[in-house]
Amino acid sequence: METKLLELGTGKAAVIKRIEGGYSSQRRLTSLGIRVGQTIRKVGSGPFNGPVVVEVDRTKVAIGKGMAMKVLVEELPT
Amino acid sequence: MKILLMGNPNVGKSVLFSRLTGINVVASNYPGTTVTFRKGTLKFGSLSAQIIDVPGAYTLDPTNKAEEIAVEMVKEGDVVINVIDATHLERNLRLTLELLEQEIPMVVALNLWDEAKHKGVTIDVEKLEELLGVPVVPTVAVTGEGIKELVLRIPESRSQLYQGTEDERWSEIGNIVRQVQTLTHRHHTLRERIEDAAILPSTGIPVAIIAALVAFGAVIGIGMGLRQFILLPFFETLIFPPIRDAVTAVVPEGFIREILIGHFGVLIDGIGWPLALVLPYLLAFYLVLAILEDTGYLPRLACMLDTLFHKSGVHGGAVIPFLLGFGCTIGGILSTRMLETRRERIIVVALMCLAIPCAAQTGAIIALLAEKSIAALAFVYLIAFLFIFIVGMALNRMLPGTTPSFLMEIPPYRIPNATSVAKKVWMHLKSYLLDAVPLIIFGVFIAAMLYESGALYHIGLFLRPIVVDLLGLPAEASVSLILGIVRRELAVTALLGLDLTLVQLIVGAIVALFYIPCAAVLPVLMKEFGVRYAVVIAMATIVIAFIMGGMLNVAFTLFL
């Protein structure tokens, strides 16, 4: 089942299924390795609805709330 | 021959550049340190080439100003050294394939090789070389490992045409990574837990508060210590008395003697202000900043502040230009090139020019206030931060457009290297001594001329409605408004000898802070944003400085 990256539980791994939003934000995400088919792990999120931090390809990337809503993922069973 | 150093942000291009050319450049542990290109010469045996350090880019399809510069540079190069972060092969190869499409001869430097080994990443270099069709050399730029071999293989650089759509490119990258990379599985380390602690809300907020307090404390503590116990005694006992004696002996009483050693004496204040007053704080600030930059904490701080910054129309990433602005406004303005939109850059630069004091001005403000009252100092900074937040919110409403989302790589923590910290501090110090100190001396000279010739008296009369009636300062303080155009800190130091009350000190510091950033900032503003913007900033800073100062003066007289 697809959920928004924003709503994924902390510590959970997931596969990226779809990225909504315009060309420029897609491009910015891709350049950091956030693209369809990638497996990510959610490390947590910053205070007051802050950015979502994920681990992807052994790097940590902070993704602002607006973008994290547009990244749709499917949780992997642990 | 022109050799371009290209690669993703924060992979160590600038360190490699220093290695190859012997030129010291600023390198830090966050993406986007290099926002403009730098040139140097590599001489090795018979090989002599121009090396260009290009700003980091994730892609040749630019997403910000710094990447645009990188793309333009590609056309000019003869050879590209593509610097790759060996710990993140997959992501870095995207740019590599894009560069291959440019048909420019290329060598790959597989940098951070030591960190990759440490993290359990093994890469089959020969296989990678075969698949890419260009030479690949493992390097550790920080220690110099592999640099010689890299240089030796530059003549072997080849161009290798690759063409593909976005999806084909990624599947090609997937293929390559599968064939060359083996990962040793490892568990979550303690180090990683500490790294994450700075991002998660429960621990991140205390960490940020402690970091800020320690940083501010260290700047003020080190600066004051250097000034009170070393520099001030040194100049007051060893330098100034002989100067005074010599001038008194040689120069007859009168105009010239007063210019040299009188009020605003060029040989006294012209030396004391830049070297005994500003220098200690500048040194302390850049030391603390260099340590913060190299640890990798700043992107984490950006993450923590994102939600708050969004209210002012910029995302958390803007904290880095702001912090650099606390060093030098010009450096801060240039580093806004890492931001995605012109709208964000305009907001950050406007706030920086108004209410972020540069390190030199901070030093002057501390000297003016802290020796009388630490609370006054805290009050001035509180006003500045409140102002930044409120005006940021207003600009966010006024300017059309939306704020892009925060998106930033969070680098691993690295322990700052003492040599690299020392080098950075020295570079900043050198540019201060060479570029700023002569200007400060010139400013003091102007002040002395105006004072001794009596012109200041007339200027004081002319500015009386503003300086005396509105701001409640003595007429002599008008010299501060004239010197403030030259350099930010001169607006503050000019108030030092004036025997002001605490209220006057605070008002004076606030006016000096909001007043025009130094003369050198204006051409930079014109170049980056156009003449109109520069004029608007110059006007706005003057008007706002007077309004803020006037309001404070009225408030103090009414309530105290």
Image (cartoon, coloured by chain):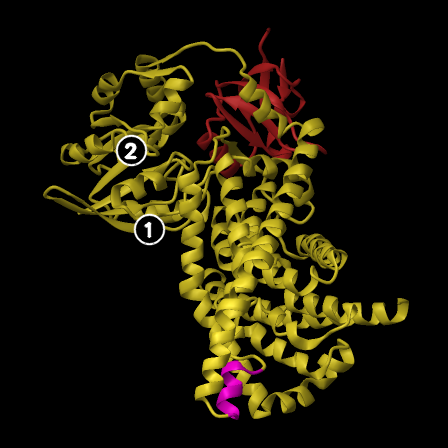
Chain colours: A red, B yellow
Q: Which residue position is annotated with label 2?
A: B144
Same chain for mark 1 and mark 2? The answer is: yes
Element on which disc 2 rests: loop
Give the camera-side residue of B557 and A33: B557
Disc 2 marks a residue whose amino acid type is Gly
Q: Which residue is mark 1?
A: B38
Amino acid type at mark 1: Arg
Apparent side of residue B40 relative to residue B112 in the rendered image (left or right) = left
In the image, taking residue A50 as reference, residue B417 lies left or right, namely left
Marks 1/2: CA–CA distance: 20 Å
Quadrant (top left, top right, bottom left, bottom right) of the C terminus of chain B: bottom right
| Residue B372 falls within the magenta-colored stretch | no
Q: Would residue B171 be seen by someone viewing this image from the given angle?
A: yes
What residue is shown at x 73% (from left), y 63% (from top)? B372
Q: Determine whether the residue tagged by mark 1 lies in a helix, strand or loop.
A: strand
Q: In this rendering, would B36 be left or right of B451?
A: left
Chain of the residue on which disc 2 is drawn: B
* Callout 1 crowding tier (Cα within 10 Å): few <14, some 14–19, many ≥20: some
Front position in the image: B231 or B177:
B231
Magenta stretch: give its range.
Answer: B253-262
Residue at (49% x, 85% y) in the render: B248
Identify the residue shown where x is 31% and y is 43%: B18
Q: Main secondary structure of the magenta part?
A: helix
Q: Answer above or below: position of B113 versus B361.
A: above
* Name of the residue lying farthest toward the top: A78
Which label's residue is closer to the chain start, 1 or 2?
A: 1
Pick the front one: B484 or A45:
B484
Q: Is residue B170 visible?
A: no
Residue B92 position, x and y percent, is 37, 29
Asked whether residue B256 is drawn in magenta, I would say yes
> Which labelled disc corresponds to residue A43?
none
The vertical placement of B187 against B212, above or below, is above
